[in-house]
């Protein structure tokens, strides 16, 4: 079956930290897109070589209804010498791109256990932002969102996470690894350190991990040591493309 393919137009391209840009596109043809929060899209980018570049980005849309959206929001981290980075960091509004998708299984299950950890570093929190409006559908589940970055100024979407954490079942932990002193309301250290303070328990909890592949492996190992099985840990690694 051919992959669903969409033409999108760039509406805005904004720096949201020193190294991360937020890009918003509108769907032109087809002009509606349905996805599940937590999924990603793949951009087919023009390239001098024979093959086009394919690069994946998590859908960061914050909206109540993911059936038939007209917009796509993504966040892109700067990669030195990166080919997609070069294209997106310099893309002008009005530019058109081809997108395929949605893809991925990092979505909330219909039935969730007592506690769910949503853990991401850098742009790896994008899928969780897109889930924020779903969390109220699970009043019997506590969501603990752990956002890891080197410095507080590397973080983004904080207002959205703090807003979500006003709900009784949502908790937000920004974790900074390189600040000398933890800024107010932040934990100093890695996400796995913060996770351990929450005493993850294989009987009652499950975890979602997204972003840097090393972080995903490290946190997965921490959870394995706490007897978590593979099915209790959903993982999305932002692996680099081979071409
Ligand atoms: C499922 C999935 C979802 C993703 N979602 C996002 C997302 O939401 N936001 C986002 O920013 N990225 C995301 N990525 C990563 C993204 O697809 C690209 O790999 C990234 O933007 C780099 O592409 P590039 O063409 O600029 O770099 P490339 O031209 O592919 O790489 C240039 C050089 O940098 C190295 N490199 C590539 N990426 C990194 C890195 N992250 N850190 C250090 N070195 C690197 C490569 O090995 C290579 O030597 C996702 C990846 C996957 C698989």
Image: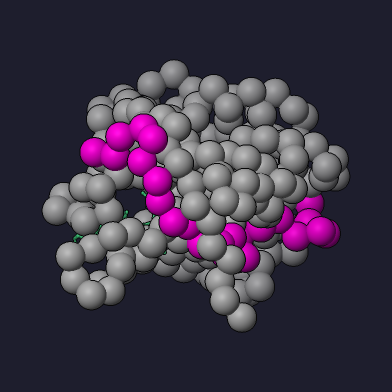
Q: Residue placed at 82% from the left, 45% from the top?
A: 138
Q: Does 210 appear above or below 73?
A: below
Position in image of residue 41 (x %, y %): 50, 57
**Location of ligand 1 given as a quarter of the image:** bottom left
Q: Nearer the viewer, residue 111 or 45?
A: 45
Magenta-colored span: 90-114
Q: Residue placed at 30% from the left, 68% from the top?
A: 52
Res. 35 image quadrant: bottom right
Can I make out residue 87 in this image?
yes
Position in image of residue 96 (x %, y %): 40, 46
Q: Main secondary structure of the magenta part?
A: loop
Position in image of residue 205 (x %, y %): 70, 57
Q: Residue placed at 44% from the left, 19% from the top?
A: 184
Q: Nearer the viewer, residue 201 or 104?
A: 104
As for residue 109 lying within the magenta part, the answer is yes
Position in image of residue 36 (x %, y %): 68, 54
């Amino acid at each position: 079956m051919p992959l669903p393919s969409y033409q999108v137009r760039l509406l805005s391209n904004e720096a949201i930290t020193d190294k991360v840009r937020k890009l918003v596109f509108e769907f032109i043809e087809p002009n509606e897109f349905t996805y599940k929060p937590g999924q990603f899209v793949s951009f087919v980018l023009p390239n001098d070589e024979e093959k086009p570049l394919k690069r994946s980005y998590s859908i960061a849309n914050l909206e109540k209804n993911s059936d038939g959206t007209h917009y796509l929001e993504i966040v892109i981290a700067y990669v030195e010498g990166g080919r997609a980075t070069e294209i997106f960091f310099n893309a002008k509004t009005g530019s058109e791109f081809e997108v395929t998708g949605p893809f991925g299984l990092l979505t909330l299950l219909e039935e969730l256990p007592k506690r769910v950890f949503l853990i991401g570093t850098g742009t790896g929190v994008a899928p969780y932002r897109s889930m924020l409006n779903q969390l109220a559908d699970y009043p019997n589940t506590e969501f603990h969102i752990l956002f890891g970055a080197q410095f507080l100024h590397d973080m983004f979407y904080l207002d959205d996470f703090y807003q979500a954490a006003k709900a009784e079942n949502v908790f937000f932990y920004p974790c900074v690894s390189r600040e000398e002193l933890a800024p107010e309301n932040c934990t100093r250290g890695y996400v796995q350190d913060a996770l351990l303070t929450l005493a993850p328990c294989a009987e009652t909890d499950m975890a979602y991990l997204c972003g840097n592949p090393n972080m995903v492996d490290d946190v997965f190992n921490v959870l394995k040591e706490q007897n978590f099985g593979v099915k209790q840990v959903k993982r999305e690694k932002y692996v680099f493309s081979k071409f």
